[in-house]
Image: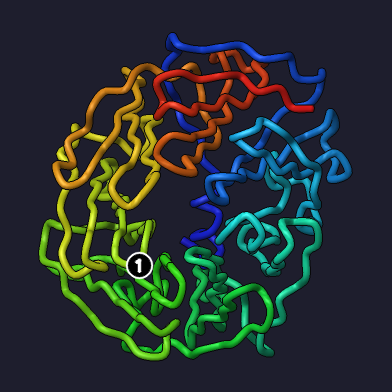
Amino acid sequence: MTAAGWGRRALVAAFVLGVGAGVTAGASTRAGHFPVLVVGAGPSADYVLVAEGCPTLSCLVLDRFDPLSGRFTRVSRPPLASARDSASGDLGRLVFASARLGVALVGPYGGPQMVYSTRDGARHWRRVALAPGERAIDVAAGGGALYVVAGHCREVSGFERCHDYSLVHTSGGSGWSSVAVPNSVTVDPYPTSTGPQLGPVAVYGSRVTIAQISVGYQTPVRVSSNAGRTWTTWRIHWPTLTSVDGCVLTPSSAVALWAYCPTGMQVSLYRSGDGGRTWAAVHQQPLSGTGGGFFVPASSTTAYLDYGYPRHVLYSVRAPGLRPIRVGPLPCASVSSETFSDVSHGAIICTASSSPTAVPRLVVTDDQGVNWHVIAIP
């Protein structure tokens, strides 16, 4: 995977879900308007990227949606350069630490990436300057802080090799500082091709957690409580956190983390309640990484799971038991984006049928996924 792939993997996904009951239809969306991406930013705000009837950047807009009132407010999308990469243009990743603080990774897949941040709820975006020679690899947000993962990268024999990583971060959105990541924090599982890898970065305030690619029968978990200045390593023994591509961690607080770990064709799920030192497995059925399912943490104790094909049903997973409990079928035939801003409120972009001409729609829940309502895009 290229360095840019970490961010792109988190943004570009297609999931196949089942058509279910419990759907309330809202007013119809204007012809040609459809949602492309929904990003959670806390209990009072989701950001929805909308295509307005044409395949050019001028028709790609960003709205702020208040799930409590149902109101949309037009804001500014990050500056994009191309509409060719996907329905979301060359937006590699968009994440928010709060309703006001957000950061975006922009640029062609596999090419140079630029970073933009906002501290006024996406009304204005400002480019984040990196050190000379550094390349933006990923962005992360959480606990009121924004981070950029940067490194020095070059292509060698068709593979992108990066080294000398750094974490560039801000708390509150004004004033960025950079901290060099020690080489001991990286792992080099494939020295003939990819070189040292940092892995997906999970952040919550000044706490940074990285689950590396498994080496032998151990998975190194690197933890910093001071934004990357010093690190502690915990070695998690097989099979916990075993992954061929590095577990994607989602922090829900300074000490609670959820892990999504690709193990080949299957995915394993875990939760930590002590900042990553120990992990408990979700008592799941087989979850295929290509079967159309999804896993969305909603709080420090609750996440939502859909196994995908052949039955597409929403389950809640709650600590400490971590046994999936059936909530009900989802009102979709395919899903392209999803978020839960808290245990009660969730939003999904999906189509009502599997027809190639089906138009995506925004459906939301305010009762923990029991009932879903179609929301018209203004």
* Furthest residue in direction front, as rendered: 69
Camera sees residue 153: no
Q: Residues within 10 Å of mark 1 (few under 14, many from 20)?
A: some
Q: Where does label 1 land, which residue?
A: 254
Camera sees residue 292: yes
Which residue is drawn at the image coordinates 20% and 58% (left, top)? 242
Which residue is drawn at the image coordinates 51% and 23% (left, top)? 334
* Furthest residue in direction right, as rendered: 58
Where residue 84 appears, as percent x and y from the top left, is 75, 45
Where residue 92 appears, as percent x and y from the top left, is 63, 56
Where residue 160 appears, as percent x and y from the top left, is 52, 71
Display coloring: rainbow
Q: Observer-nearest residue: 108 or 208? A: 208
Look at the image and tell me in which quarter the C terminus lies.
Answer: top right
Q: Residue 241 sits in which quadrant?
A: bottom left
Horizontally, residue 136 falls left or right of residue 21, namely: right
Horizontally, residue 273 falls left or right of residue 91, namely: left
Horizontally, residue 107 falls left or right of residue 153, namely: right
Q: Is residue 240 above or below residue 205?
A: above
Q: Amino acid at mark 1?
A: Ala
Q: Secondary structure at mark 1?
A: loop
Horizontally, residue 130 falls left or right of residue 305, namely: right
